[in-house]
Amino acid sequence: MRKLIVFTLIILSFSAFSQNPEDLIREANEAYNRSEYSHAIELYEQVLALDLVAPELYYNLGNAYFKNNRIGRAVLNFERASRLDPSNENIIHNLNVARSRLIDRVETRPLLFYERCWRDTYMLQSATGWGITAVIILFIFLSVTSVYLFSRTKGIKKTAFYTGILLLLLTVLSFIFAQKQYNRLTAQNEAIIMNPRVSAKSSPSQQSPDLFLVHEGTKVLIRSTLGEWIEIGLTDGNVGWVRKEALEVI
């Protein structure tokens, strides 16, 4: 596992809270470094309870859960950190380390070449990063458009025209990537199994037959919800029903 990420949350006003989140984060980091992982977890969770979110916070919390041998919670928090900062190598590394400790080895359909390229490209930045990129490229596009409109030189106008088309295409792609990352960030259709062992049922009833077993830390797709039951899907095509308390949404 790679070490904690030291970070600071910018706070405008916390007079309503009994303790400053920066103090909680500092205390949590110190507790982690003293190998007091349960105490570090408690402090990091207190920061999250203040509705403060940062990839570094989820990453550090995931590290603490991993050191405390709570692999399901570790995977959950690394997944949440990855949603906020998908290109962070530390997060990706520790998520993969945590996954290597899981019981289930669910087969995943390999992506086609173009699917992998598309995914790897939009995963380069977060939704915010792609949004900023789109605005920057759009500004350059407008500047190039001005050159095209006001230049009297044929060669410059021709270059500006084709450059403008390329920049417009990149702007549209950046906005598409930003929307895709935003949808990924806000999606409520993925979850992590929290119970050590869960039997997926053929229907939303405790009396229905068992179809397959899933274990703590396994990532599942939420297909539908019925009362206290959730229909889950695995990447290998298995589908079944589990109780809500058996999992937690990423």
Image (tube, rainbow, N blue to C red):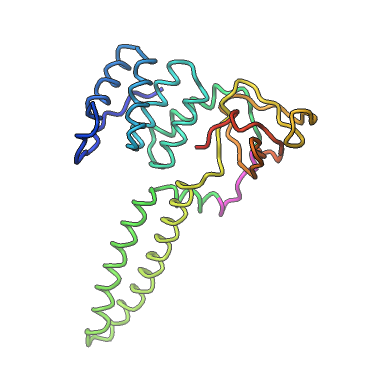
Residue 201 located left or right of residue 182: right
Q: Position of residue 137 (x, y in %)?
A: 31, 64
Q: Residue 237 is drawn in which quadrant?
A: top right
Q: Is residue 21 above or below residue 171?
A: above
Residue at position x 55%, y 40% from top? 190
- Magenta-drawn stretch contains 120: no
Residue at position x 43%, y 17% from top? 67
Q: Residue 54 is drawn in which quadrant?
A: top left
Q: Is residue 170 above or below residue 96?
A: below
* Magenta-drawn stretch, dominant element (helix, strand or loop): loop
Outermost residue toward the front in this view: 16
**Tally of marks:** 0
The stretch in magenta equals 108-115
- Magenta-drawn stretch contains 114: yes
Camera-side residue of 116 and 103: 103
Q: Position of residue 12 (x, y in %)?
A: 19, 41
Look at the image and tell me in which quarter the N terminus lies.
Answer: top left
Residue at position x 36%, y 54% from top? 130
Camera-side residue of 158 and 213: 213
